[in-house]
Image (spheres, rainbow, N blue to C red):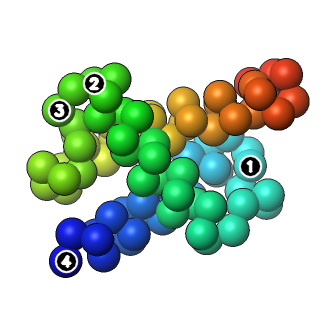
Amino acid sequence: MGIILWLIVGGIIGWLASMVMRTDAQQGILLNIVVGIVGAFIGGLIFSGGSINEGLTVYSFLVSLVGAIILLAIVNLVRRGSVR
């Protein structure tokens, strides 16, 4: 059941992060899921203790969203040379 939660929440978080960073037109659902899951991992590392593995709370959702936004900013920086 945990993997299904990762996919659903990861897709939502990745989609929201791509809307914030204006990269939604370039990403499909699969990339949104990957960005959401990796972003949740990054956010959990940065804010220590905000992982969606511990349960889906508002705090863990926001930590995952911030991590996904950071991931997209890094990707934009490497790709284009600007955060945008």
Q: Residue at x 19, y 77 (%)?
A: 1
Name the amino acid type tagged 2.
Phe
Mark 4 residue element: loop
**Viewer-nearest of labels 1 and 4?**
4
Q: Are marks 1 and 4 in contact (CB under 8 Å)?
A: no
Mark 2 residue element: helix
Residue at numbered disc 4: 1
Q: Residue at x 79, y 60 (%)?
A: 25
Mark 3 residue element: loop
In the image, taking residue 8 as reference, residue 44 lies left or right, namely left
Q: Residues within 10 Å of mark 2 (few under 14, many from 20)?
A: some
Residue 54, image x, y percentages:
12, 49
Name the amino acid type tagged 1.
Thr
Residue 35, image x, y percentages:
54, 51
- Label 2 and label 3: CA atoms lie apart by 6 Å
Q: Residue at x 82, y 33 (%)?
A: 79
In the image, taking residue 38 as reference, residue 9 lies left or right, namely left
In the image, taking residue 30 as reference, residue 45 lies left or right, namely left
Residue at numbered disc 3: 49
